[in-house]
Amino acid sequence: MPTSVSRPFLLAYSSEVLDLLDLSEADARSSEFLQAFAGNRLLEGMASYATRYGGHQFGQWAGQLGDGRAIGLGEAINRKGERWELQLKGAGMTPYSRRADGRAVLRSSLREFLCSEAMHHLGIPTTRALSLIATGDGVVRDMLYDGNPAVEPGAIVCRVSPSFTRFGHFEILAARGEHELLQRLVNFTLSRDFTFIVGTDAERFAEWFRLICERTALLVVEWLRVGFVHGVMNTDNMSILGLTIDYGPYGWVDNFDPGWTPNTTDEQFHRYCFGQQSVVARWNLERLAEALMPVAPARKMLDAGLAHFDDTLQSALSTMLAAKFGLLKWQNDDATLVETVFELMQQAEVDMTEFFRQLAEVKQHAPALETLRSAFYRDSLYESHAALFESWLGRYAARLGQQSDDDASRRVRMNKVNPRFVLRNYLAQEAIDAAMQNDLSMVERLMQAARHPYDDDHPANLTAKRPDWALDKVGCSKLSCSS
């Protein structure tokens, strides 16, 4: 059962998720809504539970984990027949809390609430967030793990998803030798979440694992498209549905850097950095395949699924990159063109989001480097790399000349895949700082911007590059898992 809180207060809710659950704005403002999603009472039909899973964390088997601060409230079937699980994150201790308090602080809860909805509107598969509620209770956390714990305001997010099943749910059963229960979980997952897969048991299993691999590959490519870094790609943070799940120390790439990680815990090895996410996804799928081995009809089905991941990843990557650069069709020699500019962007500290929005403005017959100037963080680097970028722009314009479309149509296509607004770390931190002072106006502005991330007409202060002050500010450049 959730642990009651003293003074719950509704900070924010998603009107889109209300609609998914057939709830109204009036429902969201009701006492029943507040008490239920603060964990103070269960509504009729709710059944609270926590689940057991294991996982590989930073490449090492961590043993039994589980919902240490997430408590499920059951499933809702909406008028469209869609199934949605509801889950409170930060609602108190469970049997899997592992000596922790099961609570979450406002800063991490607000980040999860905002990012869940921002990712959805970017078109990226994700769990959703219904509500963000302050608990009125303090939570002690050592944010930087430096021996300086402090009391922070607590909060609870209600997460919503068709399923919260993770790779780790299967891993723990295989590790414990609970093969009968493992088979039951596979059967349950197929019958509830993959009802469209038909055929014999063996055929259904093969297609199921193949689809998990495919969705995982497509998910990672979508992360790369917008510059998102998950930060903690442990196997227990991987969704069986190919959804983005568990928003901890995530971040968006500002100056382009494949080696950037937002996670302070990952600073030494950069295992979960931006450029490694597809490699880690493959590694995680291999661990899932090992867990499923005891119940797989044949090993070759698992091998085929992993091979399908490789094929899907390569195909989706080339399609995605072609779209980002405004190319109608990917050609083999485009890889050199793309790799060259990515290297230049890294060397010259070029902002990824700004670069691609400005690249759409480049004129095919008169490419001007000045068009891209706003994407550079430092004038000195702009000047020292100008000749190299001008040379690249010439090659890029020549490549565009091989296509049949004009600048205007290319611009429209590019701006549909290259967002104008992303939830940069410093923006989320500004919202947190304001919320700590009971000012939720920034939260509302970010939610409004997140609903239309590809539009041009955003306030300049929500689309600006990372300011210099954010480089060293806690919560902006780096984040810990502390929440």
Image (cartoon, rainbow, N blue to C red):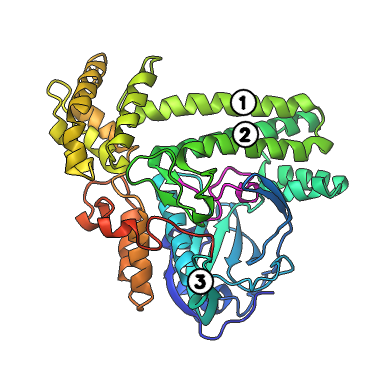
Under mark 3, the amino acid is Val
Q: Is residue 64 left or right of residue 82?
A: right
Say which element carries label 3.
Answer: loop
Say which element carries label 2.
Answer: helix
Q: Are marks 1 and 3 in contact (CB under 8 Å)?
A: no
CA–CA distance in space, label 1 to label 3: 40 Å
Q: Is residue 179 left or right of residue 114?
A: right
Instruction: State whether residue 301 appears in this view.
Output: yes
Under mark 2, the amino acid is Cys
Q: Which residue is mark 2?
A: 213
CA–CA distance in space, label 1 to label 2: 7 Å
Q: Which residue is mark 3?
A: 105
Identify the mark nearer the N-term, 3 or 2.
Answer: 3
Q: Which residues are magenta?
A: 229-247
Q: Is residue 84 left or right of residue 131?
A: right
Residue at x-position 40% and y-position 37%: 225
Q: Are marks 1 and 2 in contact (CB under 8 Å)?
A: yes
State the predominant SS element of the stretch in magenta. loop
- Nearer to me, 59 or 107: 59
Foreground disc of the pair 3, 2? 3
Under mark 1, the amino acid is His
Identify the mark nearer the N-term, 1 or 2.
Answer: 2
| Rendered position, 462 above or below 433 | above
Residue at x-position 13% and y-position 34%: 370
Q: Which residue is mark 1?
A: 308
